[in-house]
Amino acid sequence: MGPLGWIHAILNWVLTWLHLMQQRQVGWKSLIRKTGELEREQQPLLKKLKLIVLFNPLVEWIDTTHAMRLYMHRKNIRAGEQEGTLASHEQIKSFIDFYNINMDDFEPSDPEKYQTFEDFFVRKHKPGTRPIAEEENPEKAVVVADSRVVTYDTVAESKKLWIKGTDFSITNLVMDTKLGARFSGAAVASFRLSPQDYHRYHSPVSGTIKEFRSLPGDYYQVDPVALRSDINILTSNARDYVLIDSPEFGEVLFVAIGATDVGTVCIHDKWQTPGEKINKGDELGVFQFGGSSILVAFQHGRIRFDDDLLDCSKRCIQVSVEVGMSLGEATHTQRNEGREKGSSYADVVKGG
């Protein structure tokens, strides 16, 4: 490439980023599964700059003092208290406009019906807006939240490409060596919710609740910039988990992880009781006040994630998904032997 070619390439890059900044599309690259379009996540520019400043080697080293953690924890508690006040109602309309939220998907759809921002934040879907993929087929696992997802066949692969925390493992995530050992070589799906997303979450499979546990912790960001740093985000943040015993998938671990501005990580009381029957798509719990994350782990060899999800994840591209979409299929049954390869990244992306 000659000098003029290089100048042209640099100008294209600058103009592209100016356009993205104008549209506030400065987050991590995502594929919108519904449309096949690639986009960068909409995010306030100041938040993006703060992430870059906070999650770099120098600040990561400084943070070993835990001073930043304590500051963020106290800040999040104060923010959570403010979101529950009547005065917070004034934030709702500007928040909807900033993120272009389609209120037709929610009930109530009128922003004035929410007394506080906290009420709006945990809004419910309107019935029928999030159909469950193959609802009567227990061998089909489904997406658990409106979110951006990456999927990996092993924890080792996820650590190599996405979750860079030095201490990340299933054992450290659940703080239980025996349970962690049962998920050796586990396949994992990592769902990340942004503040503008619907913040209720749902079961990926049908089965029986086997175990529940709540673990206290910090409130770090779960943005890809943070997850791909050396800070142990997922094993440090406050989290709840349930273990679901599924005839089709074996034991399935569902971990709801708090993050910046999250005041509550709450799995509903009903699902905290071992022996309760749950169906895929049932609402498991709710987050409050901000971004958050969910990790679902399947025992080795028990799921085949959809090909488009796996293909994008290997390229470190998130897939923007909705509750109830297909996640993958159980692999231990004869039904899945010889299954044809599904849509790949190239098939799904427009113009691919």
Image (cartoon, grey):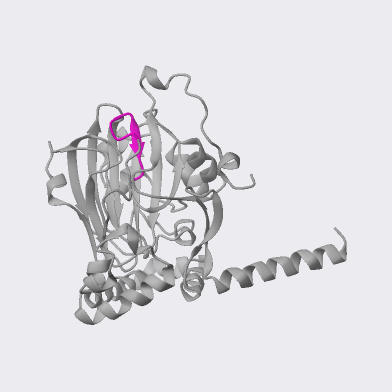
Quadrant of the image containing the N terminus: bottom right
Q: Is residue 308 left or right of residue 210?
A: right
Q: Is residue 184 left or right of residue 320?
A: left
Q: Is residue 339 left or right of residue 105?
A: right
- Evaluate whether residue 342 shows in this view: yes
**In the image shown, does 233 or 139 lie closer to the viewer?**
139
Q: Is residue 179 above or below residue 256?
A: above
Q: Is residue 1 above or below residue 283?
A: below
Q: Residue at point 22% right, 74% down?
A: 116
Q: Farthest residue toward the top? A: 334
Magenta: predominant secondary structure element? loop
Q: Residue at point 83% right, 62% down?
A: 5
Quarter of the image holding residue 314?
top right
Q: Farthest residue toward the right? A: 2
Range of magenta residues: 134-143
- Please state the horizontal and vertical placement of residue 347, each as a whole percent of the image: 58, 39
338 falls in the magenta region:
no
Quadrant of the image containing the C terminus: top right
- Please state the horizontal and vertical placement of residue 234, each as a whole percent of the image: 36, 54
Q: Farthest residue toward the bottom? A: 87
- Please state the horizontal and vertical placement of residue 194, each as a whole percent of the image: 39, 62
- Please state the horizontal and vertical placement of residue 200, each as a whole percent of the image: 27, 55
137 falls in the magenta region:
yes
**In the image shown, does 101 or 59 lie closer to the viewer?**
101
Q: Residue at point 37% right, 77% down?
A: 94
- Evaluate whether residue 237 shows in this view: no
Quarter of the image holding residue 183?
top left
